[in-house]
Image (cartoon, rainbow, N blue to C red):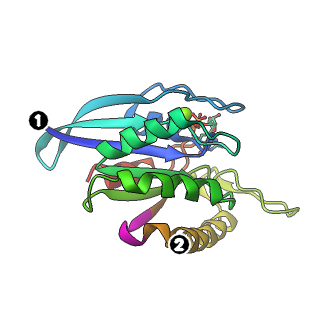
Amino acid sequence: MKQHNICFLGQTGYGKSSLINALFGTKFMTDPLVSCTKELYSVSKIVKIENEMTMVTVYDTPGIGEFSSNSVYQEYYNYAVERADHIVLVLTLDRTDSTSQDLLESILPYVKNENVRFTIALNKIDSGAVGEKEYIAWDTENNGPSDDCKRLIDERFGTIRKNYSEEMKFLPFEIVPVCAMYHYGIENLKERILK
Ligand SMILES: Nc1nc2c(ncn2[C@@H]2O[C@H](COP(=O)(O)OP(=O)(O)OP(=O)(O)O)[C@@H](O)[C@H]2O)c(=O)[nH]1
Ligand SMILES: [Mg+2]
C-alpha cells in the first residue's frame, strides 16, 4: 500500500495535537496550561488519495519550549522527520520566532529528500492580542477572522516569509491560516497535506 507520512512540529501550546484532532478525528491529549504531549505519538488512517488507497500516518511530537533542551525530544523530531513526506510547522500570530527557527534548523539535516513538502500552519488566529487597542479577532457570524484580524494575518505572513526564508531556501513552503478551536481552514490544510 502507498504510504504518506506527515510530521507536525512546533512550540508547546501552539496547537499541534488540536490541529491533528481537527484534521483526522483523533483524540490526542491537549492542555491549555502546561506542556502536554511528552512522547512521540503516531496514528494511521487509510485514505483514498488520487484514486489510490494510501496509509496516511501522522506524527504528533512534543512541543519545544523556551526552556526545554530535551535531547529525547530531539531524537523524536529526527525520527519523525526522517520518515516524513510532509512537514507541518505550527506557528501562531506570536512573533517570537527564534525557538521555532532553531527547531527548524535542527531538523533540516533529517529531511528525507528534496521532494518533501513543507507547510506552515498559522494556528490560533482567533487569539492575537494587539497592544492596548480593543480588538475583535473573530467574526462569529461568518466563522472566520475579522477584517482587523485579516490585516494581522497578512502582516504575520510577511514576518514569517522574512524570518524563515533563510532556513527554508531549499524547502519552499506555503502558509495556511487555521483555527483548530473554531475549525476554520481545516479543510484547506487537509487538502494541502493530503495532496
Ligand atoms: N483559542 C484557540 N485555542 C487553541 C487553538 N488551537 C488549540 N488551542 C488550545 O491551545 C491549547 C494547547 O493546544 P495543544 O493542541 O495541546 O498544543 P500542542 O502544540 O499540542 O502542545 P504540546 O503538546 O505541549 O506541544 C489547548 O488548550 C487548545 O484547546 C485555536 O485555534 N484557538
Ligand atoms: Mg500536543
Q: Secondary structure at mark 1?
A: loop
Residue 81 place in picture, x, y as percent: 37, 45
**Residue 53 % position (x, y):** 13, 38
Ligand 1 shown in quarter: top right
Q: What residue do we see at 78% from left, 60% from top?
A: 135
Q: Label 2 is placed on what type of residue?
A: Arg
Q: Nearer the viewer, residue 164 or 127?
A: 164
Q: Is residue 43 left or right of residue 60?
A: left
The x, y position of residue 80, in whole percent, is 37, 40
Residue 177 seen by the camera: no
Q: Nearer the viewer, residue 52 or 81?
A: 81
Cα–Cα gap, marks 1 and 2: 36 Å
- Vertical relation: 194 (above or below) 13: below
- Disc sitting over residue 1 in the figure: 1
Determine which quarter of the picture holds residue 171.
Answer: bottom left
The segment highlighted magenta reads 169-174
**Residue 129 picture quarter:** bottom right
* Sequence-first tag of 1 and 2: 1
Q: Is residue 183 left or right of residue 194?
A: right
Q: Which residue is mark 2?
A: 161
Q: Left or right: 16 with respect to 31?
A: left
